[in-house]
Each structure stands twice: as structure tokens, then as C-alpha cells.
Amino acid sequence: MISVIVPVRNEEQGLAQMLISLREILSTLEGSPEIVVVDDGSIDRSGRVAQEHGVVLRTHQISHGYGQAIRTGLAAAKHDLIGLIDGDGSYDPKDFARLIDIHDHYDMIVGARTGREFSKNLAKTLSRKALVCFCEFICGIKINDINSGMRIFRRPVARLFLNHLSYGFSFTTSLTLCMTLNGYRIGYADVNYLPRWGHSKVNHFRDTLRTLQKIFEIFARYNPQKLYLSLILVSVLAFSTFWLAFSMKLISLFTVAYLGLMNLTVSILLGLSFLAVPQLRRMERGDENIETDTKGEVS
């Protein structure tokens, strides 16, 4: 059966309505499904509202981030099949039934967001599309929605990657990439994305930088060759731009040489750091094998 994790932070405005609707969906399932609400340092009545609706409640006294809230939920859940839905009203719990119906066919099923609310901001839509295209190039597979907050996955699989997943906003992004790059089956089902209640806690500049950092870290760990190839292409494009500017007499030859040297140096340093990660991963696997062998010894 399923445990549904609902991370919340200052969401009392519509949390009760969402929990009632979610409970109605889960009541149609066999067994004993549960709702685990993780209150990540709310200063409003979110925790009390959750408690009034008879859910499993875990509370952070101060905010530790979206990813840590999900980790707390994973530890508290009694079932290995895990559902995830944001507590801000941006997802309709009725759409959750669609994911439940087909989850048996996949290691993770993701609610791919659709609707006017999801695409109304042109700048966010373009940046999101650019990020997804880059991730699809590295992963070599289509990704319908990389960071949806509505999904179903299996806890034993997620635990394999917990040390590599973000503690913040990009937890779902990093989970999608880790599972994709390791060959797990990921399916997508369209869900309607709705206007959220209250104010967003996302700092777009800060959280975008942190997301990119985590994405590059995961790619360096699981597919460094393709990431380095991308870096080479960017480096060649940058130098071509410098040369074009020189041809148009917009910059001097000295400037081209200086910028080209800087470009080459940065590319080499980044490339070496990317290629060092697989060696670190092999060392980690070696430590795991040693630990396993030691546990298996009989004295």
C-alpha cells in the first residue's frame, strides 16, 4: 500500500481542503494507505490543521528545506510505495488517482504538469525548456517533466540515491535524473497545474543556481563523458564567437587570445573535475564492498 508525503511550509490557507480531497482518493484503495505531512518550520497553523485531519505529522522546528522534508517523510512512512504531492494547492489530488492506476508499470510515475498556469510565464517556460533539453541530451531520453511535485516511486530505489539528492527545492529534479541515468523505468501522466495558495517560497535566482549545481554534480557522477563533450561544444562556440567579433573589428587580436586562453583554462579545469568523479564513485563502491564483506565474516 501507499504512503503519501505532503511537505508543507505556511500552507494553512488551503491545506485542510487538500487533505480532505486526498483522503477521499486514498479511501478507494485497499489496505491501509496513509498521509504523512511534514511541517517544515511553518510559523502559521499548518501543523495544527494537519493534526486535526488525523494524518501522520512530523515537524521541523526550523525550515530545513523541501528535500529534507521529503527525507523526514520517507523515514516516517510505513509503506515502501511512496506518493508525493506538494501541499500548496498547485496539484489536484484527484489527478493522483491517475498515477496510482498505472504505477505498477514503472519504478516511478511522474505527474507531468499541463495547463495555463504552468505556461503563463514566458521567461520561466523558456528557461525550463532549455534546462530539460540539456538534461535530455545528457540522459539520452525524453523527460516530460523534470521537477514535478506530484509523483509515485518506491522507497528502496530512492534510498539508493539519497546521498546524491538535493536537500532543497531540486530534490525531485535530482531524483528524476539519478533514476533516469541508472536505467530505472520512469513514466509520465498529464496532470493539471493549478494556481498555488499563498506565496511561493522559491527564490528563483538562488534556487536556480543550486539546481544547476546539483544537475552538474549528478551528470559528472553518472555520465561525465557526455557532460565533458557538452563543455567542449560550448568552449568551441565561445571561441568562434570571439573570432567573429575580431573579424568584425569589435575586439582586438590580443583580446581574442586572452579570452581564448581563459576559455581553454576553465574548460580543462572543469573537465578534470568532471572526470575525477567516476574515480570517486569507484572508490565509494570499493568501500561498500569492503563493508559488505566485513559484515559477512563469521568469527
Image (cartoon, helix red, strand yellow):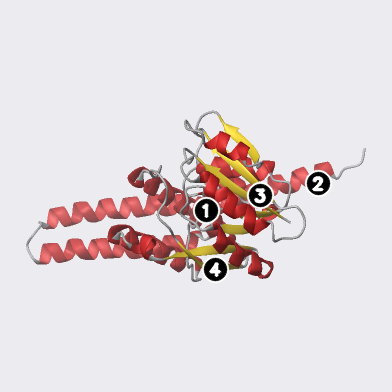
Discs 1/2, front: 1
Q: Which residue is mark 1?
A: 172
Mark 3 and mark 4 lie on one chain; the one further toward the N terminus is 3
Determine the residue positioned at 58% across, 54% down: 21
* Residue type for callout 1: Thr
Q: Which residue is mark 3?
A: 159
User: Which residue type does callout 2 highlight?
Assistant: Asp
In front of the other: label 4 or label 1?
4
Name the residue at 63% across, 56% down. 24
Residue 112 image position (x, y, % from top left): 49, 65
- Residue of label 2: 293
Residue 191 in view here: yes
Q: CA distance from mark 4 to mark 1?
A: 14 Å
Near-viewer residue (162 or 144): 144
On the image, numbered disc 4 is attached to which residue? 188
> Which of labels 2 and 4 is toward the front?
4
Toward the viewer: 40 or 93? 93
Q: CA distance from mark 3 to mark 2?
A: 21 Å
In the displayed image of the protein, which residue is found farthest to the right? 299
Residue type (three-letter) at the residue carrying disc 4: Tyr
Density class for disc 3 (Cα within 10 Å; few <14, some 14-19, many ≥20) is few
Cα–Cα span, label 3 and label 1: 13 Å
Secondary structure beneath label 4: strand
As helix, strand or loop, the secondary structure at mark 3 comes to: helix
Q: Please state which of residues 297 and 258 is positioned toward the viewer in this rendering.
A: 297
Number of callouts: 4
Position of residue 225 measured from the top left corner of the image (x, y, whole percent): 48, 62
Q: Is residue 212 above or below residue 107?
A: above
Q: Is residue 280 left or right of residue 295?
A: left
Query: As drawn, is 139 to the left or to the right of 20?
Result: left
In three-dimensional space, the C-alpha distance between marks 2 and 4, rounded to whole angstroms, equals: 39 Å
> Residue 23: x and y, percent?
63, 52
